[in-house]
Amino acid sequence: MSVSKKIPVGEYKLGSQYVELREKLQSPEYAYHWEKRMAFWATPTDRRLPIALLGRTLREILETPFEDLLRYPSIGEKKFAALISLLDRASNTSKEELVSADQARPSVAWEKNPASTEGDAGLQQVSEFQWNTWQRVVLDQGLADEKIGRLCTSLEEMPRVLWHKTLRTYCHVSLEELRKMKTHGEKRVQAILRLFRDIFEVAAKFQNSPHLKIRMSLRWTDDLELWVNEVLADRDFPSRDDLFEHLISPLLAQLKTDASESVIRLAETRLGLHGPITSVRQVAKEMHIARARVYQLLNEISDIVFVRWPEGNTLVHKLWDKFIREMIDFPSQEEYEQWIAATELFFPAGKKAFESFEEETLPTRHHPPLEIAKPR
């Protein structure tokens, strides 16, 4: 490195340290280190980290002259000093330690993610650097407009006001600002951090794949959509067992993650899982609550399904349209009742269309309209 008298003393010292560490780390004994990203050596207590360089491998850093690194956007003397600290840690890390670390945890993008490897307890130790990394992955992968309620672990962890908020709500706030936001206690902050961390672990793997784009969804919704499309292409109405396995069961399982015991009990009763399908009046009597409260709980069910699977109502509507317009017979009264109960419970937004189809067509069919098919 050529040194001019015009170079500030601080930069001169940094340059000298960089050259010394660079020569050491370029020796063959550090070959195992070269493909590790610089974030591997970052810790939650680090400050003023050079975020723009943390995604680069040690090899890429060592191949870059000091002057070019210092001219990198947003990299000043303080952040370069932090980079020197990371290089020093790398030089003091043995190959055996790296091998042991690789075997102890699964490899994830950007390597260092202690909040993940330590489980939810690690979320309390998240650093500003980690939080900023998660935010940038969400933004870079075009996921900022995904709704929080669609992707979070459980809707019970999130207040209703956040269900339809997008990830962008938190993409431009610091961790310190997040913790100081009104109505954001530790439980809510932990839920938000967990959501961003989980998205990071999936999306960051595609950080260096510009030809791929992430589409985030819950696992069960993809399976359900595949089943619906298969049924749409078929000529027969699915059996009661198929309806339960592929439509009712995954929706009910999601309710058990997102809703209270009373909501789950109501859903099972309305589906006739523990006896005959009952009316709202009967349910209110059995649960010892007012009918108005039953309707509130039913609305909560449909709200949960809508935020978790917004495409569901349209797809189920298409199925109903197919069955009615193509005059496909239900195999039995039991299949008909099960289908009506499920659509009425989970997708009431389409109930007016369902009712009009019934009035127009079903009286001439094998199975007359049922009381359960009428809108609540």
Image (tube, rainbow, N blue to C red):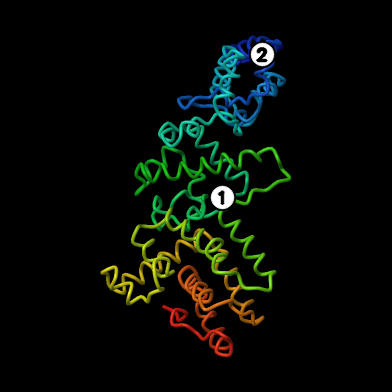
Categorize mark 2 by other alpha carbons within 10 Å: few (<14), some (14-19), many (20+): some
Residue at 43 percent across and 82 percent down: it is 371
Q: Which mark is residue 189?
A: none
Q: Position of residue 50 (x, y in %)?
A: 57, 27
Residue at 62 percent across and 43 percent down: it is 140
Give the vertical position of 254 relative to 135 (above or below). Answer: below
Residue found at the far left of this picture: 288
Work out how far the residue at label 1 is from the one at label 2, CA to CA, in angstroms: 39 Å
User: Residue 22 vs residue 301: left or right?
Assistant: right
Number of marks: 2
Figure quadrant of residue 236: bottom right
Figure quadrant of residue 121: top left
Give the vertical position of 178 relative to 112 (above or below). Answer: below
Q: Which residue is mark 2?
A: 30
Q: Quarter holding the N terminus? A: top right
Figure quadrant of residue 268: bottom left
Residue found at the far bottom of this picture: 364
First-in-chain label (1 vs 2): 2
Q: Position of residue 73 (x, y in %)?
A: 63, 31
Q: Position of residue 321 (x, y in %)?
A: 61, 77
User: Residue 146 vs residue 258: left or right?
Assistant: right
Q: Which residue is mark 1?
A: 144
Q: Secondary structure at mark 2?
A: helix
Indicate which label's residue lies in the foreground, 1 or 2: 2
The residue nearer to you, when weighing 177 against 231, is 231
Question: What residue type is disc 1 on?
Answer: Ala
